[in-house]
Amino acid sequence: MLNENKPRLITFDVYSALLDVQDGLTHIFAEASGLLPDKAGPVVAAWRAKQLEWAAVSNSLSCGRTLFRDCTRQSLNYVCARNGLGLDADIKERLVFAWDKLPLLPEANDAVTDLAAKGYQIAILSNGDQDMLEAVGGLFSVGFHHILSSETAGYYKPHPSVYALPEKLLGIACRDTLHVAGGANDVVGAVAYGMPCIWSNKFGDVLIDPSYAPNYEIEDLSNLADLLT
């Protein structure tokens, strides 16, 4: 068991822990652009990296949080221009809204459903805009009790205000929330805030600063429930 105290709330990052962003978008991008998947894959990886880079820039500008939908749109425009891809505006918009219906990682639905069946409150705590996360929540066979967006905080993770949302909005103390992260920066943000954290490290990443180690590191979500029983 993770610890002696059962968490009152289990929160999940979406885009790194629950959704198959790279493979899902590669298929969608290849179909929309006419590129072969082996050519579309690197473009998608650059799109995701630039999206996260622009979100980080938004945190630093002190000009208000740029909508995640706009980060997604602007980073798509960037990679298309960088790679000489003259996609029509309507195709680009379909690609932007494809983020609302990306495929789940193979074990994600069962992992979330199992926790809900065991009586845990489950929530999304992620960087997407509220409407994007509401759409993603609808992809699961069980409903999330809460969907907490960085849009409400006015910053992107790993800013501490995002991890403060469960306590601010739900009255659930940090120590009583368990966050399931998929990306290294999300781990750092949760641990730095003092929130218990499990890292679903599906791609074998490492922390840039090991002093921010999670409580547990697992290969994927398939054995998540075993840590809590």
Image (spheres, grey):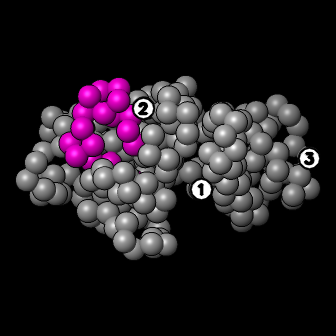
| Magenta range | 162-181
Q: Dot 1 lies on which element?
A: helix
Q: Residue 67 sits in which quadrant?
A: top right
Residue on which disc 1 sits: 22
Distance between the alpha carbons at the discs numbered 3 and 1: 21 Å
Residue on which disc 3 sits: 86
| Residue that appears at 24% across and 38% down | 173
Distance between the alpha carbons at the discs numbered 1 and 2: 23 Å
Q: Nearer the viewer, residue 216 or 134?
A: 216
Of the residues shown, which amino acid type is indicated by label 1?
Gln
Of the residues shown, which amino acid type is indicated by label 2?
Leu
Is residue 96 at least partly visible in the picture?
Answer: no
Q: Mark 1 or mark 2, which has the lower sequence index?
A: 1
In x, y percent, where is residue 112? 30, 42
Q: Residue 120 sits in which quadrant?
A: top left
Circles 3 and 1 in contact, beta carbons < 8 Å = no
Q: Is residue 223 magenta?
A: no
Task: Bin the neighbour count of mark 3 within 10 Å (Cα to Cα): few under 14, some 14-19, many 20 and up.
Answer: few
Residue on which disc 2 sits: 148
Horizontal side of 55 relative to 215 (left or right) equals right
Task: Bin the neighbour count of mark 2 within 10 Å (Cα to Cα): few under 14, some 14-19, many 20 and up.
Answer: many
Is residue 209 at least partly visible in the picture?
Answer: yes
